[in-house]
Amino acid sequence: MATSITYKQRETIASFVSRTAAAYHVDATTFSADRETSFLAVISGSSTAIEALDAFGCPIPEDLTSWSPSKEGVGGTMRLFRNHTFPSKVLQPPKMRGCPECLRQDFEDQGTGPAAMAMRGHWLVPHVTLCLEHSTPLVTLWRESSPALRFDSALHLASLIPAITVGSLTLEPRAATGFDTWLDARLEGHGDGNWLEQHPLHAVCNYCLMLGTSLLRHITSAPSAVTDEDKWFVYDLGFQIARQGEVAIRDALQGLQDLPGGPHDGPKKIFPKMYDRLAYDTIDNPEYDEFRRILRSHMFETWPLGVGDELLGEPIVERRLHSVRSAAKATGIDQRRLRKILAAEGIVPEEGLPDAWQVFDAKLADTVLKAATTLITAKDFAEGINASRSQFDLLVAGGVLAPRLPSVDDAGTKAIWDPADGVRFLDSVFVGASPLRQAQHGWEHISKSAARLMVGPEVIIRAIQNRRIVRIGNHADFDGYAALYVYHDEVCSVLMPEPSSNQSIELFSKTVGIGQPIRMKRLVINGHTPATELVHPKLKTKQLFITRDDADVFHRRFYTPRTMAQAHGKSWQSMTASLRAAGVTVFSPDGEDYGTLYLREDVDQTFS
């Protein structure tokens, strides 16, 4: 028997099936099962499910299909919607949103209970916040963790009829923004040809939100505290700039740097939300590469980044630019005096950007800075490298640091320390450091790691400088020596190795950069790299170890991002992007997940 339900414009298949099931007084799951399919398959846009419904007298119009997410053609955790790809969790979150006025109009037009009210496809897109037809914000109608129950909309709408019909769910109307109308047009398949339209829609919308959040610094001191109800304004704030293209975006980034604050406050404070999202949250998603490139290029040209800093997740291995402020800190010269010296040499203007932002070529000015260096006291030196006095004293006692002049008595002054020596010391221990957003399990500040092993910090420092210890962390919440973290298990392995120098699979995995040891164990079990079963020297039980010979075999065959970056002297982010472009895929011959692991010969051929 064919259904008499009439579909609504932009309605989803799931909504239509739920309304049809309600007309037959059953739930959508039962209705679908009776027609030899499943409601979950309907929700995913399965063509097989649609054919099964049609065969049992429930034809699905093409318009419904076009406004319903589908996993066909994309698969995995992605969904195709209106010819744009979205992560499934984005289009299918636990909460269901909608326009109460659209639902009320549905009810008044037909007045047949919940079967009259249809859920629209564009309501699933989280970036859509307004019903353009009624100028009313979308609201959360219900929450449900189970997809089968969540999308059986007729069941939920039945309990909401009183609230919908009296308008208690309807929020105050607002005017549509440029972002609102543009996004709706994009979902309809139209556009105005602006710069954003050459990029994936979901990434574009997220970028508008990131940029808009950063631009809120012009308005509020707490841009990250904006509520969901106000995100429509933030989307449009970013959209109005980003739609104009790269030049406008870079101008906006510079405008953020003209506000109070400096590079010493960190990029997370200058570019709130945007920096973290591009540097960490989306780092492996190529859809954000162009937005990352713009920010990276801008910061590369305007930020005084030194060794130990990071640029969008990549460690800085050599200083390119100094600012008047950073150079003053490195040389111990008063900022005002240093600016006059640099201006006299034509390196910076006498008046211009603030000292923190006035950058110049560090190599070009090296001779001038060395000539102008002023010696400082031990107290100022310790503060300059951000070490406590006790930490500083241990470094001196261990021979890591030494004054430029022999002694206070001989010099006749306490100013016997060269701040440039402090900069060189920090540079030597932060080369190749990984940015740490927080010190998770296994990471220790170098002083604590040394105390646990009952050795002086100079022992660990020399191992770092000799590249025997390579897992170095630069804690984002601190500067200088206070930010120097080490991975304690690696320190133990290097400084207090077992007589055989064998490593457990877990320690070897972390040392080479395989984040999940189960992947390394899987690699061994499946015969792709060897391991040796030995008796654990302390536990006296047999377990798999990676011997030196085993490690040599692994390194001759494979590269991890960390080891290939070390071998080729490039950042792993840029190398993985180049490998993707060259069609080189990760090692997975048997369909198993070994993580981001490449055959060495493939990588070497690509970069030879």
Image (cartoon, rainbow, N blue to C red):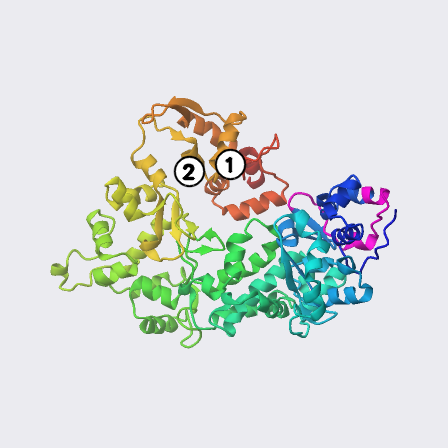
Left or right: where does residue 422 sit relative to residue 518?
A: left
How far apart are labels 2 and 1 at the CA level?
Answer: 13 Å
Question: Sequence order check: which comes first, mark 2 or mark 1?
Answer: 2
Q: Is residue 73 visible?
A: no
Q: Position of residue 453 (x, y in %)?
A: 26, 40
Q: Position of residue 524 (x, y in %)?
A: 50, 27
Q: Give the camera-side residue of 3 and 366.
A: 3
Q: Give the camera-side residue of 148 and 30.
A: 30
* Residue 564 highlighted magenta (yes or no): no
* Residue 55 highlighted magenta (yes or no): yes
Q: Give the camera-side residue of 106 and 239.
A: 106
Q: Residue furthest right?
A: 1
Under mark 1, the amino acid is: Tyr
> In front of the other: label 2 or label 1?
2
Q: Is residue 135 visible?
A: yes
Q: Position of residue 528 (x, y in %)?
A: 53, 27
Point out the stretch of residues depicted in magenta: 52-77
Under mark 2, the amino acid is: Thr
For the image shown, how many numbered marks are present on the structure? 2
Marks 1 and 2: in contact by CB < 8 Å?
no
Left or right: where does residue 312 sit relative to residue 140?
A: left
Left or right: where does residue 49 sit relative to residue 380?
A: right
Q: Which mark is residue 559?
A: 1
Q: Position of residue 228 (x, y in %)?
A: 57, 65
Q: Give the camera-side residue of 189 and 374.
A: 189
Left or right: where does residue 434 sit relative to residue 166?
A: left
The local secondary structure at tag 2 comes to helix
User: Would you identify the image quadrant in which residue 8 lies?
Assistant: bottom right
User: Would you identify the image quadrant in which residue 580 lies?
Assistant: top right
Disc 1 packing (10 Å; few <14; some 14–19; many ≥20): many
Q: Which mark is residue 511?
A: 2
Q: Which mark is residue 15?
A: none
